[in-house]
Structure formats: structure tokens, C-alpha cells
Amino acid sequence: MNTVHELSNDGRGADMGEILIEDAPECLDSDALRSKMNAEGCGSIVSFLGLTRGIDDGVEVHHLEFDAWSEKLPEVLHGLATEALNRFGVQSIAMSHRTGVVLPGEDIVCIHVASIHRKEGFEACSWLIDELKAQAPVWKKEVRADGAHWKGGLG
């Protein structure tokens, strides 16, 4: 079962936007996560959806295995979302990352950014996936026809 971590202010009562972080140990439903967002007053929702490739470097990929520091992952994603809200002035962010075995064609990671204007949404979404790949405590093993390979970053 997926767990959603929600925050709609900075803990001191100041409205800073809405953040939804969802744990996704068995499946990731990006549409369901997006439907939980509050996009009132927004003119766009920009989304990024990362999928498992079936072929990498010309070799068939059987599946990916994602291991995560499960207690820390939601905290890191929330910190990135908080920084994006402040940096780009967007209204709402929803993020989720799979753990465990992910088959070719299945969703790995999703990021939704609701904003008044699309430019800020695109900038925030791009920044978020780059920072997630650099900072999230997630490790990826690619199980391919030629053996298993640990991959750097979330690639």
C-alpha cells in the first residue's frame, strides 16, 4: 500500500504551497497521485514520468531493482519539493519513487508541478528530477540478459 506524506505550510502557519510525497513500494500510479493535488488557481501542471527501459546499451533489460533508505527517502523528496516551491514560486508539488522490482515499461518516478504559469512549472520539474537523481537515497540494480549491474544515480 502506498503512503502519502502531505504538508501544506511551513509548520509555522505560513502558506507555502502544497507538497505530496508518496511511498511506492509496489506500484506507482501517477494519475492517482496527480488527482490528489490542489491545482486551484493554477494554469498548468507539468509532469515528468520515468519508465524502465526494456533495452539498455543494446542489451535486453529484464527488470530493475531499487533499494532505498526508506526512512530517509520521503524526507529528502520533501526537502527538494520545499526548495522548489521557494525557488520557482510554484503552487503544488507531488512526487513518488518506486522501490523494489520494476519491470520494463513500468513507472519508476513521477513528479507533478502545479503552477500559475507553465514556465515556472517546467523549470521546477526539470530541477526536481535532476536533484532527485543527485540526492535521493536510492540505489538501482539493472538485471539484464548479460547479468546484473549496479548503476550510478537513478539514470
Image (cartoon, grey):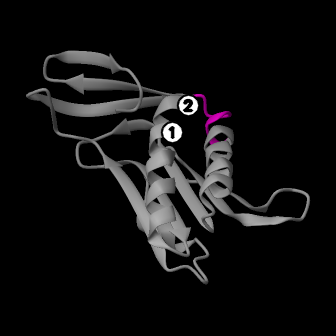
Image location (x, y in percent) of residue 117? 50, 74
Disc marking residue 91: none
Residue type, mark 2 in image: Gln
Magenta highlight range = 69-74
Whether residue 100 sits left or right of residue 106 in the image: it is: right
On whether residue 79 falls in the magenta region, the answer is: no
Where disc 1 sits, the SS reads helix
Q: Which residue is mark 1?
A: 132
Evaluate if marks 1 and 2 touch, with contact meaning CB atoms under 8 Å apart. yes
Please tell me whether residue 26 is drawn above or below residue 72 in the rendered image: below
Q: Nearer the viewer, residue 101 or 126?
A: 126
Residue 33 at least partly seen = no
Where disc 2 sits, the SS reads helix
Residue type, mark 1 in image: Leu
Whether residue 33 sits left or right of residue 75 in the image: it is: left
Q: Residues within 10 Å of mark 1 (few under 14, many from 20)?
A: many
Please tell me whether residue 48 is drawn above or below residue 116 in the rendered image: above
Residue at 46% across / 75% down in the picture?
44
Image location (x, y in percent) of residue 76? 64, 38
**Chief SS of the magenta region:** loop
Residue 127 at least partly seen = yes
Q: Which residue is mark 2?
A: 135
Residue at 66% across / 59% down in the picture?
19
Q: Nearer the viewer, residue 26 or 64?
A: 64
Residue at 50% across / 43% down in the picture?
25
